[in-house]
Image (tube, helix red, strand yellow):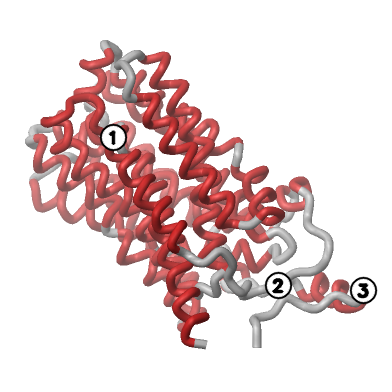
Amino acid sequence: MARAGAGHRRAVAAGIVVGFAVGSNVANVGAVATSLASSYGVSLTVVGLFTTALFVTHTSIQIPGGQAIDRLGARRLAFAALVTICVGNGLALIVSDPALALSTRALTGLGTGIGFIAGSDYVRAAGGSPLAQGLFGGFGVAGGGFALAVVPQLERAVGWRAPFLLSVALGLVALAALLLAPLRVAVARTFSGARATALQVIGDRRLYRIAVMHTAAFGISVVAGNWVVTLLERHGYGTNLASLLGALTLSVSVLSRPLGGWLMHDRPRSTRLASGVSLAAGAAASAGLAASGPVPLAVVSTVTLGLAAGIPFAPAFAGAARVRPDAPAAAIGMINMCGSLLIVTATPLVGLTFSLPGDGRIGFLALAVVWAAALLVLPSDAQLSAQPRDDFARRQSSNGHPRCQAPG
């Protein structure tokens, strides 16, 4: 029994390390956007496309990747995803050519798209609670915050290759963690019926409001994380201070994402209120960054944005998986795909606003509007604490299949 418990803990820890390594790729390029523009001989808008290229493939693989994970297992797909990430970043080290950067970022996006869902599902399969899902999400976004803080310092030693070297190193660490994790873990929730198709998952309206909430919290935090350093630099902040504050927009979610999981597990009636407050706080924080005022305002805004982005994560992921027990990874892929679509479209658009009056402020004000708009379709308490569908469970039971349940 002790061995099984240790195996579960190693599996959950490995899943969290995978999330951290995958997350570093989200903001590694944005950490030194201005320097990369100079090294590659392109505009900031093109540098924004480096992130867009990653998220185009990241987005396209979400549901197919989730279905593959449901069929083949999370650990196997997480391993393949990390190898893809290491290869993509390794190829990007060859030369500072924009075409090479765009193609290798697209390759890396295949790895991040599968890797993030696989890490989350590995935590779930190992019996991880909503709190464990929150820890996974927190460390996933902290990987981006880590990149924002470390890449500018690493760039002084290795130049434009810094973002890609860091992601290769973290990918190798995550591969080692997976190798040390158990090959098999007892699955916390079993399913023996027919698996849902992609169209069934996409057409499930219960996932829509959850997707909007996740899109606002996750998507905007990533877009802001990619441009906040540039915004602060353009408005008088030094590179070191701007990098530190930019890292806060992502890294403090390591605190609030587990908090969201704890609320869902122990205080389910508070989950909706906390998620709504988070969306409102995110809107206020984005507006505060757009103001580009004194240092105390920037500190409060970056910390608030990071905290606000974290609360809805575990309710969104755990809720989506419970809504579709016949395809939990595909359901998570569906809501994550929506967040990724926002990143794909908004990252270059916010970059474009740096050539408009206000030098980036218009872009951050637009992000504040998206935060606030998500409040209009906030999921209900029932959706945020969703249990497997009663009619679905009854149908499976009548067909001779067991209900989804925790192991006794």
The dot on residue 28 is none
Residue topped by disc 3: 399
> Which circle's residue, 1 or 2, is located before the other in the chain?
1
The dot on residue 190 is 2
Residue type at mark 3: give it: Asn
Local SS, label 2: loop
> Which circle's residue, 2 or 3, is located before the other in the chain?
2
Q: Position of residue 86 (x, y in %)?
A: 41, 37
Residue 135: name its quadrant: bottom left
Visible in this render: residue 284? no
Residue topped by disc 1: 165
Visible in this render: residue 401? yes
Task: Give the label, 3 or 1, closer to the camera.
Answer: 1
Local SS, label 1: helix
Q: Residues within 10 Å of mark 2 (few under 14, many from 20)?
A: some
Q: Residues within 10 Å of mark 3 (few under 14, many from 20)?
A: few
Out of 247 and 233, give the one closest to the viewer: 247
337 horizontally vs 200: left or right: left
**At 64% across and 68% down in the image, what residue appears?**
322
Local SS, label 3: loop
Q: Position of residue 182 (x, y in %)?
A: 51, 67
